Image (spheres, helix red, strand yellow):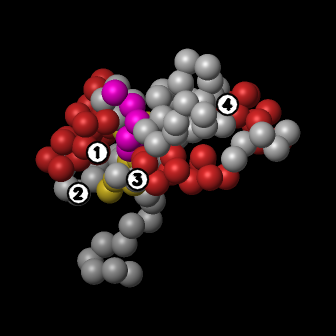
Amino acid sequence: MMGDQAKLLIVNADDFGITEGATDAILECHRAGSVTSTTLMTNMPAAPYAAQRARENPALGVGLHFNLTSGRPLGASASSTLVDSEGALLKRRDLAVRAITGRLRAGDVRAELQAQQV
């Protein structure tokens, strides 16, 4: 046991920063005691809002939600194997097809991971 209390269950809420509404809901659950951590989608439009709210709630554990299938990339170029013709991240099915057929470059995945960790 650690201290007076041991954590028996960690409840993680996914998709912190996907929208302001989802972010607020996660924070409400955290303040009510049911959520202990979350994962931030740094490439989504509400990510700056979520990051600010996380700083205001230091007891909430925040990790990275590495995202390759929703929104716009942070580190991928137009020639990346992660993006479609519009420059958006591929949908799951298309990403899976590229991976299975050997048309997904590891360097592109690595660059996007590094960009999202900021």
Evaluate if marks 1 and 2 touch, with contact meaning CB atoms under 8 Å apart. yes
Residue at position x 38%, y 81% in the image: 1
Classify mark 4: helix, strand or loop. helix
Marked residue nearer the N-terminal end (4 or 3): 4
Q: Give the range drawn in magenta.
A: 40-45
Evaluate if marks 3 and 2 touch, with contact meaning CB atoms under 8 Å apart. no
Circle 4: residue type: Arg
Residue 117, numbered label: 3
Q: Quadrant of residue 42?
A: top left
| Residue 11: percent from left, percent from top | 43, 51
Q: In which quarter of the image is residue 80?
A: top right
| Residue 21: percent from left, percent from top | 30, 24
Residue at position x 53%, y 25% in the image: 88
Whole-angstrom CA distance, mark 1 to mark 2, is 9 Å
Residue at position x 34%, y 27% in the image: 45
Disc 3 packing (10 Å; few <14; some 14–19; many ≥20): some
Residue 59, numbered label: 2
Name the foreground residue: 1 vs 69: 69
Circle 1: residue type: His
| Residue at the extreme right of the image, as rendered | 101
